[in-house]
Image (tube, rainbow, N blue to C red):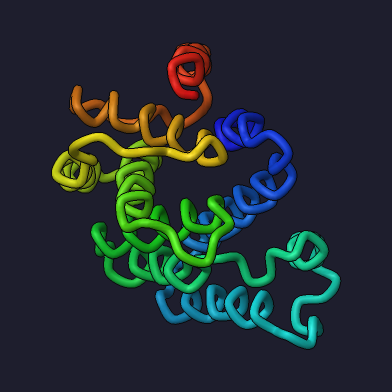
Amino acid sequence: MLAALLSAYAGREISRHRLLWTLDARLARVAATTTEAMIGQLRLAWWQEALSDTADVMGRGDPLVDALRAAGEAPPAGLTSWLDGWEAIIADADLETYATGRGGGLFHSLAGETKVPAWLQQAGAVWALWDFTGHVKDPELGTQALDIARNMLLTGDRVWPAAWRPMRIAYELARTDIVRGKAAPNRLTPRLYFRLLRTALGVR
């Protein structure tokens, strides 16, 4: 799985990164299995309340909630934006809000800092749109996502801290395909695996 490979570049933060990617996968499952927007919104609200419960009562017994609490990641930084992004795709397929929320929130959480620069969240948004193209069944939505992502690509030089290497690799993978107008693969292919290795070698 791509998330597991990216987490491997997080060094001592590998366990925390894996937990956060697992949370994103759970949220993706909510979006994929929701047929009524209101039900999906309620399911996402549950995650907000469970991970923000200072009494550590709500959600107790859920392995992921328990693990996030044990790791001091309840709530993760950027959680509200992250959930808002998933809600946007459930409610009305608002791709820009989805990308900024899901991708920006996820990258914020992976950084593990209270505040992060806007460009890191923008990089996350680009990655989220690329990832979306690998799963969406509507080709028009996929094309729209690529167009939006192309306009959101970072410009100029950025200083990526060493701890942000996994996010930089993810962004570079996305950027390469977006520039070529290619959708993301819908699973981890050998080609994507070797691309990741090559990208990681060039990203320090």
Residue 115 location (% of width, % of height): 46, 64
Q: Residue at x 53, y 81 (%)?
A: 42
Q: Position of residue 112 (x, y in %)?
A: 58, 56
Which residue is the extreme one toward the bottom?
55
In the rendered view, does 202 fall on the left or right side of 139?
Answer: right
In the depicted view, which residue is nearer to us: 135 or 85? 85
- Residue at the image position 47 percent from the left and 51 percent from the top: 107
Percent of width and height locating residue 79:
52, 68
The residue closer to the viewer here, 191 or 31, is 191
Q: Residue at x 75, y 83 (%)?
A: 58
Residue placed farthest to the right in the image? 61
Q: Is residue 168 above or below residue 50?
A: above
74 lies left or right of 179: right
Q: Looking at the picture, how far across and down is residue 71, in whole percent?
A: 77, 59
86 over 193 or under it: above or below: below
Looking at the rendered image, the quarter that the N terminus falls into is top right
Height in image: 112 above or below 167?
below
